[in-house]
Structures are given as C-alpha cells and as structure tokens.
Image (cartoon, rainbow, N blue to C red):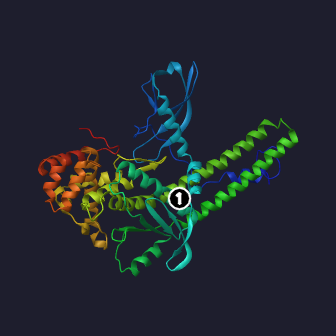
Amino acid sequence: MKSAGMRTWLLPGIGWILAAAAGLSLSHGLSADLPSPAHGWKFDIIHLHTGRVFQGLVLKETPGTVQFRCIWQNPGERTKLGPVTTFARHEILRYAPLDAKERTELEIRLEQLKPAAEVERMERIELQPAPWRGQANAGLTYASDHFVLTSNASEDIVRRVAVRLDQIYEAYARYLPPRCQNATRTQILLVRSTAEYRQILQKQASTILNPAYFDPAANQIVCATDLQELAGELSRLRRKHQEWIGMLKQQQAALHKIYKANPPEEARQKLAQLQAKIRAADEENAKIFERATQRLFQTLFHEAFHAYLAGFVYPPGENDVPCWLNEGLAQIFETAILEAGELRVGHADPERLKQVKEALRRGQLVAVADLLKADSSKFLVSHANTQQISDDYYVGSWALAFYVTFGHWKLGTPELDEYVRSVRNRAEPLAAFAKLVGQPLPAFEESFRRYVRALRVDGSTDW
C-alpha cells in the first residue's frame, strides 16, 4: 500500500507505517500558555525592548544571537517546555543569566521531566509476587522506607504508582521533616476496580463513600483505581510503536546498504520524521495517561499525607492533630505538583478557591471557631446527605490551613509542634490556636477573611 505523494524509492513497508503514524496518539497536543512566575525553580530571564519577558534556558549564544527555550510553570500545572526561539541581540533590552550552579540544577530538572526518565524510574522498581485476598501470588508488592504497596492491578499501574508514592513521601520528608525516627511503614492496598473496593468495604461493614481511606489504627490506606482498560490500550500502542521503530531502523540500514554513505536526503528525512512522530505519539499517550491518573494520584497523595503525618511527624499516641489541620494540609498537598522528584506547592487550587470565595460572599463560610473545634464526623462522608456539611468543612479547612501555611508560615515550626502537643494535653482549642497565630481569634478571623478575598490562584494576594 502506498500513501499519496510518496516517492517510489521508499522501501516496502514504509507506506503503511506512514499512513498509520497519522493516528498514533489518543488525542491532540496541549494548547500553549503564557509564561508565569516560577515556583522555586530559577531560570534565565530575557527582557525585550518591546516589554515582553521570557523565562527559560539559554541553549546557545553567539555575538549576534541568543538561542532560548521558554519554560512555563503555571499555577497548579506541570512544567511545560516551549519551542526553541532565537533572539537577535538588538532585540534584547537586558538578560539575567543563571550562574553555573543554577544552570546545572535546571538542566538536571529538565532531564528528569522527560518521559524516558519516568520509564527508567519505573523499570528500577523491584516488584515481588504477593497474596491478594486469600489467593497466593494474585498480587504484586513493593516495599520502600516509608510504605509497603500491595495491589492486584496491572504491573504497569503498580510500577507507576510505586514511583509516585516514593517521590511524594520523599517530598513530604523534605517539606515537613519527620519527628519520629522509629516509624512503622504504612500499608497501602491499591484495588484494581471500584467494584472490588466496594466489596472490601462491605466485608468490613463500612459505609464510607470516599474512593480511598486511611485507617490510623491499622496504619493502612485502601484505594480504588479503574485504570486497567486504559493502561492495557496504551500498553498495546506502545508495543506497536516499538515494532514500527524496529522496522524503521531496518529501513535505515537497507538505505545505507543500497546507497552506501550517501542515501537520498529526502529518504533520510522521511524516516527521521516518522521516528519523531512515533516518539511524539508515545509522549502524548503518556500525557493522556497522566491526566487520567491525576485523580488517582490526588487521592493517594491526600491519604498518604494523613499517613505520613501520623506515622512520621505527629504519632497519635504522643500528639493530637486537629481535624481542620490534618484535612486542610492533606488537601493542599493532594494538588501539589510533583515533578523532577520535587514538590511544587503554594498555588491555590482553583476550584476550592472559587468555592471558598463564594461561601464567603454568601456569608456561609464556616467560622474559624467551628473549624477549630470540629471532630472527624464533619469530614467523613458516609451518607449522601452529609456531603454538603463535609464539603463546607473541607473547603473551610483548606482555606484556613492555606492561610496558616502560606500567610503565617507556621508549617514545620516549633510553634506548630507546640500547638499540636497542647491540643493533645487538652488545652482549650481557641486559646491554643490564638497562641499559635499570635492574635486574638476575632482579629485573626477578620484578617483570614480579608486574605481569602484577596487570594489569587498563584498564591499571591493584593494586600
């Protein structure tokens, strides 16, 4: 079969590969974004005479030009790389370059963003057969310093989840260093379908509606995933692409054999374009799976934060983390961006921010005093008619924890440790909190509401 416009010198097999390559991925590429301020990463900054500012990495400099790759870090989104752009020197008003150490750090981070780096990390994961619900070797298990993951999901999913959990626990440890040196690893059960997850809950006589939960008494997280079908399709596509790459390499070898050192330039370019298209399709399919797994990872990161806080920072027998703080921080970290082995946090989740601003506008935002005294019943979704009160307390706790973390910078401080201990020792909740923030509660409530009104998605305010 021959595609329209193909040259007769193309060798057999190329035609159907070219035709198939038009539909290699499951969707089209992402739309472009404008550059936004960095969140902890440092970049080369170029200011043009036109007033435009570009952040990214200088790739090459000549006396007359600067070759530059733009890098975008929008709030709540993963880092995106723009195309390579060349600026003439006369276009540039000023240029703020990175120093040698900063440049090396950025280059390492960019390497870690490549899909190949994720694949390499997945391949390094050592999985072992494990029993699953009474059946020998029906599951897979992975053990790290912080957790033991056991699942009956496909190997690809288990590897991907293990990599992300490794990274998120390490990031938690850097952001909120452990206080407990002899912590017990969290047991994490990843169930391959929601239906089976419901069966497990029924067996335990549980009425929880959440897609995952953390049981502090058992130090166990149970979480459902419905990614088997998508993972299978993507695995099939990846194998097919590998076959095509193999055939293209054979075509390249045949060209060199026929034409020796000088194969037709057009033939070489066509083969290179096809290889690039297949690689691009694999990268796009990886992005599709990334988007599909986002909810799963947010759920796991939320419950993993509860587990990390209880197991490594504030053990329940020695501390008593108030529900508002526990649930508020877990929500902040579930939407953090994890990439290049680092945690980008500090942006405000757009949906929660919208909800809390609307609640404030309507006069329905839960009072700080009520949040401080709330117990776990306000946060556990066990019946449909409790969803609204759960949502109200969740969004209120998220906003309060966000203000305490990024408005008062109390996370990881001795003052927060003292607050948690004082609650454990039956201190009056409102007085203990007032001591933490250094304000009487009425004054704090007023400043908190002003903060919420002024808060932007990027975590900044206009006051």
Q: Nearer the viewer, residue 204 or 70?
A: 204
What is the x, y in percent for residue 92? 48, 22
Q: Is residue 109 above or below residue 320?
A: above
What is the x, y in percent for residue 26? 59, 56
Local SS, label 1: helix
What is the x, y in percent for residue 190? 47, 68
Residue at label 1? 160
What is the x, y in percent for residue 374? 21, 64
Q: What residue is shown at x 57% (from left), y 61% (from top)?
A: 126
Classify residue 251 as left or right of residue 132.
right
Q: Is residue 134 above or below residue 160?
A: below
**The N terminus lies in quadrant:** bottom right
Badge 1 crowding class, 10 Å Cα cut-off, few under 14, some 14 to 19, many 20 or more, is some
The answer, for residue 99, to whether it is visible in the render is yes
Q: What residue is shown at x 35% (from left), y 51% (from top)?
A: 177
Q: Is residue 42 above or below residue 304?
A: above
The amino acid type, in three-letter code, at marker 1 is Arg
